[in-house]
Amino acid sequence: MRGDGASHGRERPAAGNVFGGLVPLKVDREIQPFWEGIAQGQLRLPGCQACGRLRWPPRASCPSCHSLETGWTTVSGRGRIFTWTVIHRTKLKEYQNATPYAVAVVELAECAACREVVSPGPAADRDLEECRTHARRSPVRVIGLLLHESAGPPILIGQPVELQFMPQDEGVLFPIWRRTD
Amino acid sequence: MSTNLRRRTAIVGCAQTEFTTNSGQSAARLATRATILALADAGIGSHEVDGIVTYPHGPRADDIISGLSLPDVRFSASLQMGGASSVAALHLASVAIAAGEANVVLAFVARNGRSEAPVHDRAVQVTAGSQYRIGLEIPLGMNVPAQWYALLCQRHMHEFGTSRKALGSVAVAMRKHAQLNPHAQMYGRPLTLDEYYDSPLVADPYKLLDCCLETDGASAVIVTSIERALSCRWPPVVIAGVAQGRPDSPDDISGRQDFLGTGLRKAAPRAFRMAGVTPKDVKVAMIYDCFTFEVIHQLEEAGFCPHGDGGSFVEEGNIELGSTLPVNPHGGLMSEGHMAGMNHIVEAVRQLRGSCGARQVPGADVVAVTGWGDLGDGAMAILTN
């Protein structure tokens, strides 16, 4: 589903798993539009206006064609787990009460070159799909928090995920990925 | 490819301060002490130092120049390659000397890495792409290398079946080597695999004992031309090959096309070709062991074993003293101390001088030293005697 991007999260974090992460107030100008999208419950990525390629993280130029013309686009908010870790210790004060918490590198469902959204295949097939036009050799991957409970289902590479938006204090939305299978 | 640098320079002096958890001294004092000792080791007067290469974090060239009244430093540089900066400093020093722009180059690392500037305070500052750490990752709970590289390790385990036992094998080997090194912070503190398994998780799969030490101290080396080296105290340790390299997208891991590709994959072939040797010729490998998995990773990236085989290579004990390819006889960053790999260069020099006593690798004539910097910058030096 394009248009309004990922669904607004309706779930509350589980007890003992409260994320106090703060949406940063002031970030690098290249990154700012990402957080503006999050504030509206959308996952937005920079795309090259010359060759159309999506990229992440946000950079001034297109690594493919070097154009500096950038336009931000809303994407589906779906993807698959590419790799992950569970953080058990941290010196970040906002996360002291959240450990252990999971972080994943999510490979987005979009093909970087043509933006076609590729739906994940059957659960048994954890390899990534190809789009109709391109071999997906240039995936777009983002790092994000992953909903996970120690006693819950194990995190597996290849699991499909969807981006949720958790309301924090004062209704500020915070992005967190949720497994969908 | 140019071989202009092949065997043009040599390491003639090396020294380290004690490695502790609280030096009680300024980083500048530690740097000065190591410098004075390294110059004495070389038999070179301080007035001859005309080049300085510094680490991206810590005392600057001007601090040393002022402290020792160095009359004319005509070449100075600092790299921005994190932990790869120590080995890459040998590259810079060699370039300057080969070009005739310096004769005696000091390279050092000095810091209170445990008591004053721990990794969670310094890593983001010195790493490329800090705007991504600050703007995208720290808000989402990620801020230290253990977390970044746990992501690499997890993927490697998925792609190649690398096991937790393989990680533990590295930790145990480094600690075992440190028992032969009275200078090591872990000297007198052996480690079993069971104790490794019992240590707490930090960032899955990394446990506390998968992570290297944090250290207060300093290490310094003196590099000169081959000609100048011939009248120093020790036979020269020749820099036969040296190179640096970066992964594609050195400022970010998540979007890296070849997720496990590193700068070392590019630097190692250059260094080997310059030196005119292959991985099979290497008798001792000094691998930048910031984490256990990174030893496995770099063994593959440098060509010591095929991609994906690093786990079984270490599980079978191949990196221990007396085995196929001894890695870090001094105990490495894991067990000697974390001096950003400058201590690996010091150990390499001593192995080539034959002065390592109980941990000497017999017949060590070709030693490889790797450097690893956040987020995967790489460097390699091939040293010979």
Image (cartoon, helix red, strand yellow):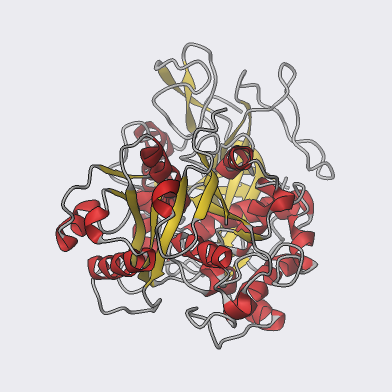
Q: Quadrant of residue A155?
A: bottom right
Classify B385 as above or below B207: above
Q: Quadrant of the N terminus of chain B?
A: top right
Q: How many marks?
A: 0
Classify B135 as above or below B153: above
Residue B88 drawn at (x, y percent): 45, 46
Q: Quadrant of the C terminus of chain B?
A: bottom right
Residue A166 drawn at (x, y percent): 47, 50
Residue B302 drawn at (x, y percent): 65, 47
- The residue lying furthest to the bottom in this view is B188
Q: Quadrant of residue B330?
A: bottom right
- The residue lying furthest to the top in this view is A50
Q: Quadrant of residue B67?
A: bottom left
Closer to the camera in the image, A12 or A164: A164
Q: Residue at x 34, y 36 (%)?
A: B100
Q: Residue at x 55, y 38 (%)?
A: B247
Residue A65 can be seen in this image = yes
Residue A51 relative to residue A168: left or right = right
Q: Residue at x 68, y 60 (%)?
A: B283
Residue A167 can be seen in this image = no
Closer to the camera in the image, A43 or B43: B43
